[in-house]
Image (cartoon, rainbow, N blue to C red):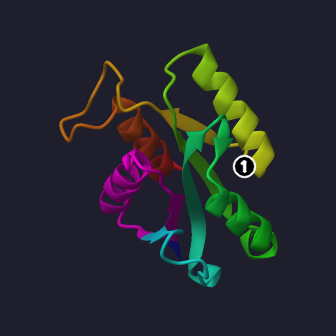
Amino acid sequence: MGIAIIYASGMTKHTKEVAEYMARELKADIFNLKQITKINMTDYDTVLFGTGVHAGKPYKPLVQFLEANRDALAGKKTYLFIECMYNDEKGDAQRDKIAEQLGIPDAVYFNTKSDEMNEAGFPAAVDEFIARLRSG
């Protein structure tokens, strides 16, 4: 069984870039919801969902995908990553609100303007998230 990364990205394309980086590192299949809306979930035991935030809300294509695929996701490990503009308590609050709304409690957020960046130019927290996924 494999890993799927399913994301919706906005105009800045930060979510897309992070999703592509994680797909390379995890050897995961990647799906952009602007291009593909039907995905055969039977090949995956782990699914990462990614979204940016607009006006405090996740991008609509991701919300619609999750609503349409709840049954197909039953029994799978699901994670959520959010690209947001905050790096503090506001980011924590936004992550928690969106995770609850989407029904994916295991959620993280990244800010591409983070002080700590990895060698590839992404927030160091992305590598921490990847390491956590690999370990368990």
Q: Residue at x 30, y 61 (%)?
A: 24
Q: Is residue 91 left or right of residue 70?
A: left
- Which of these two is toward me, 63 or 54? 54
| Residue found at the very far top of the displayed protein | 89
Q: Residue at x 40, y 55 (%)?
A: 16
Q: Residues within 10 Å of mark 1 (few under 14, many from 20)?
A: some
| x, y percent for residue 51 | 55, 50
| x, y percent for residue 71 | 81, 74
Q: Residue at x 79, y 66 (%)?
A: 67
Q: Amino acid at mark 1?
A: Ile
- What segment carries the magenta color? 3-29
**Residue 41 belongs to magenta span:** no
Q: Is residue 114 above or below residue 97?
A: above
Q: Is residue 69 left or right of residue 56?
A: right
Please identify the quarter of the rendering in which residue 127 is found.
Answer: top left
Residue that numbered label 1 is attached to: 104
Q: Is residue 10 above or below residue 45?
A: above
| x, y percent for residue 111 | 43, 30
Secondary element at image label 1? loop
| x, y percent for residue 61 | 63, 63
